[in-house]
Image (spheres, rainbow, N blue to C red):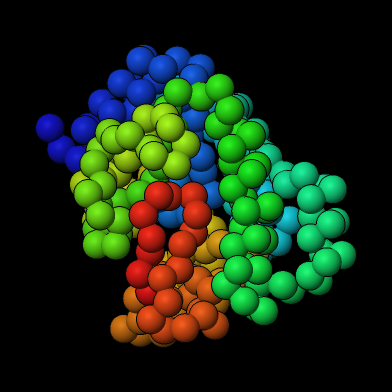
Amino acid sequence: MDKLEQTVVWLKQAAKEYKNEVVFASSFGAEDVVLLDILEKNNIAMRVISLDTGRLPQETYDVMDKWRKKPRLNIDIYLPDANDVEAMIKQDGVNLFYDSIEKRKKCCEIRKILPLKRALSGAKAWVTGLRGEQAGSRVDMQAIEDDKTFGIKKFNPLIMWKEQDVWDYIKKHDVPYNALHNQFYPSIGCAPCTRAISVGEDPRAGRWWWEQEDAVAECGLHASPIKK
Ligand code: SF4
């Protein structure tokens, strides 16, 4: 069984075991659009959610819109609570994330973590596009594991894929992807918190780049910290 076939097996297993209680959380990054294409091509019914933090790059909205128009996919977009955002901006300003790690985490909590918790409420499992190659910092990642943050099962069906596998798939199947990937953005988050990387930099060096080099940056969506 090759990597693609194994991924299909895990996705079908997740859909069969958890039916409408499994959620694929997609940010429309390269790995996520591969999974969306696999779900669509293999007719695997699964609820898909995505977080619109309100600070995403236009390129992310563009690719999100392309995928939302696919009739066989059912994609729900979750936004942060408007009252929470208003209170945060009133207290700390619109660019609070540059002030301190604590304020950056506060912004991620309000714009990402709380909406994700709402999206996952009632779910018994979720699916991510994490790859094992990225797991040097995500210790002990497994294809199917217990997610300690959310207290549900977590499926990582791309765990065996290399970056080249992802891009081979995208090119072979003409999969719509985020145009920022063509501009040296391997990892794409919110616009003010993501920059392009240079040759030789860690793929995640463009996320929260202003924080100390030796700081441990947590995306907050996955339990283990990400070392920059
Ligand atoms: S990535 Fe930046 S803008 Fe987005 S939620 Fe986190 S701190 Fe806020």
Q: Quadrant of residue 107?
A: bottom right
Which quarter of the rendered picture does the C terminus lie within? bottom left
Q: In the rendered image of this protein, does residue 135 appear above or below residue 149?
A: below
Q: Nearer the viewer, residue 127 or 145?
A: 145
Residue at 83% from the left image edge and 66% from the top image edge: 91
Is residue 207 among the parts visible in the rendering? yes
The residue lying at 73 percent from left, 56 percent from top is: 54
Residue 185 percent location from the top left of the image: 48, 71
Q: Is residue 15 found left or right of 144 in the rendered image?
A: right
Instruction: Please tell me which residue lies in front, 71 or 213.
Output: 213
Q: Is residue 207 left or right of residue 13?
A: right
Is 11 left or right of 126, judged from the image as shown? left
Give how far across and how far down residue 215 sits, in percent. Answer: 42, 77
Q: Residue at x 41, y 71 (%)?
A: 216
Asked if 101 appears above or below 190 in the picture, the reply is below
Question: Quadrant of residue 205 in the image?
Answer: bottom left
For the N terminus, which image quadrant? Answer: top left
Residue at image point 72% right, 72% down: 96
Q: Position of residue 153 (x, y in %)?
A: 37, 30
How many numbered marks, from 0 up?
Answer: 0
Residue 168 visible in this rendered orientation of the protein:
no
Q: Quadrant of ligand 1?
A: bottom right
Q: Position of residue 183 (x, y in %)?
A: 50, 74
